[in-house]
Image (cartoon, helix red, strand yellow):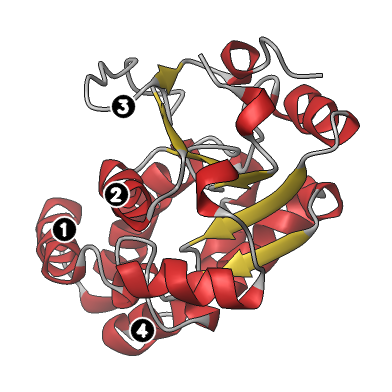
Amino acid sequence: MIAWDRVDTVLLDMDGTLLDLRFDTHFWQEHLPRRYAERHGLDFAEARAELLARYRRVEGTLHWYCVDYWTRELGLDVALLKREVEHLIAVHPHVLEFLGAARAAGKRLLLATNAHTAALALKLERTRLGACFDAVVSAHHFGAPKEHCGFWHALARAHPFVPARTVLFDDSLPVLRAAAAYGIGQVVAMKRPDSGAPERQVAEFPAIADFRDAMAGLG
């Protein structure tokens, strides 16, 4: 499915692509609302409904991904609360195998995530994935999320790559659309970002169930 002979650079998202989105789903939909309810004397359902409405208002912006923003908005230490459930942080199956094969094939590996630097540090500490990459980049370094064209221009300035000879793996369809519009040669969606949810049907882009599906012709 992937034309590896036309790839020099491999761009990889983190949450939902390399890492199981179960951690983030649980944190934002269960753990944080529960702690918010405790702090403000609300029942869980009321707190969850309030937070989901707040999430929707900033979805697709850097605020949605920003630990500092939510700490200010909610009056809770969000970075600390993430550590309360860090045991749920997990690498998806076959990721390490794929990264090793891509490295052995001479591909340049870049991790490009919307995650805030505090969340990124926690997940790299937990998984030790940072050593697998030539560079690790947070959208917060550039002031624009991956859904916006500004991110891709900033990434290319900071870590020059040839878009036509690049493949991106990401679970977000808006991000994949932005990357394709920028000129990334091949974009690939993830069918099952969250192990606790059913596999998605993705018609808009080539999609893989896990990284075994990406290894044909690599190396």
- Please give the name of the residue rendered at 64% of the width and 54% of the height, measured from the top-left corner: 111
Distance between the alpha carbons at the discs numbered 4 and 2? 17 Å
User: In the depicted view, which residue is nearer to us: 56 or 178?
Assistant: 178
User: In the depicted view, which residue is nearer to us: 43 or 203?
Assistant: 203
The residue to which callout 3 is attached is 205
Distance between the alpha carbons at the discs numbered 1 and 4? 15 Å
Q: Position of residue 218 (x, y in %)?
A: 74, 18
Q: Amino acid at mark 3?
A: Phe
Number of residues whose C-alpha sits closer than 10 Å to that of mark 3, classed few (under 14), some (14–19) or many (20 or more):
some
Q: Amino acid at mark 4?
A: Tyr
Distance between the alpha carbons at the discs numbered 1 and 2? 8 Å
Q: Position of residue 215 (x, y in %)?
A: 68, 15
> In the rendered structure, which disc, 1 or 3, sits on the residue that comes first in sequence?
1
Q: Position of residue 188 (x, y in %)?
A: 44, 30
The residue to which callout 4 is attached is 69
Q: Is residue 181 above or below residue 187?
A: below
Proximity of marks 1 and 4: CB atoms separated by less than 8 Å: no
Q: Is residue 218 above or below residue 113?
A: above
The residue to which callout 2 is attached is 29
Disc number lying in front (4 or 3): 3
